Amino acid sequence: MTRIISGMLLLVAVTALPQAAIAADAANGEKLAKRWCAACHVVATDQKSGNTQVAPFSAIAQMPGFDAAKLALYLLTPHPKMPDMSLSRAEAADLAAYILTQGR
């Protein structure tokens, strides 16, 4: 019985590890936003101004159906009006997680 319980605990731990490893880091996303996005977007409440032609992060995060995973995927694809930031998947997820915090 002890072996069965130990095996089940090991199985739970092994399946939970990948989820924890891919958890997005909003604090890193904030650093990335201030480096890459603040020239156009208002990325934080303490930022004085941004380009009036683009939405602030707070408005993006409050859009109906906002999905951080979809935004991260969007950020990985170069777009004509945005610079190619060459973000890694983790960085795109971090940036999307940070944007999500701006909608609260």
Image (cartoon, helix red, strand yellow):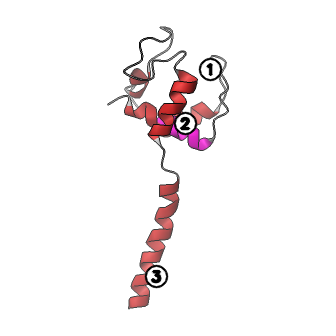
In what element is the residue under mark 3?
A: helix
Image disc number at residue 7: 3
Q: Indicate yes or no whether the magenta region holds residue 4.
A: no
Label 3 with label 2: CB-CB less than 8 Å? no
**Image spot of residue 75 (x, y percent):** 59, 31
Q: Quadrant of residue 80?
A: top right
Q: Earlier in the sequence, mark 3 or mark 1?
A: 3
Q: Which residue is mark 1?
A: 82
Distance, label 1 to label 2, CA atoms, is 14 Å
In the rendered view, tell whether residue 50 sits above or below residue 70.
Answer: above
Distance of label 3 from label 1 (alpha carbons): 49 Å
- Work out which residue is located at the far top of the displayed protein and give it: 52
Figure quadrant of the N terminus: bottom left
Residue extent of the magenta highlight: 89-96
Mark 1 neighbour density, 10 Å: few (under 14) some (14–19) many (20 or more): few
Answer above or below: position of 37 versus 90.
Answer: above
Nearer to the camera, 46 or 90? 46
Which residue corresponds to mark 2?
A: 72
Magenta residue check for 94: yes
Any part of residue 46 in sight: yes
Q: Position of residue 96 (x, y in %)?
A: 49, 35
Q: Residue at x 47, y 76 (%)?
A: 10
Q: Earlier in the sequence, mark 1 or mark 2?
A: 2
| Type of amino acid under label 1 | Met
Task: Count all numbered tags in the image, as a single digit.
Answer: 3
Q: Secondary structure at mark 1?
A: loop
State left or right for residue 80 relative to residue 36.
right
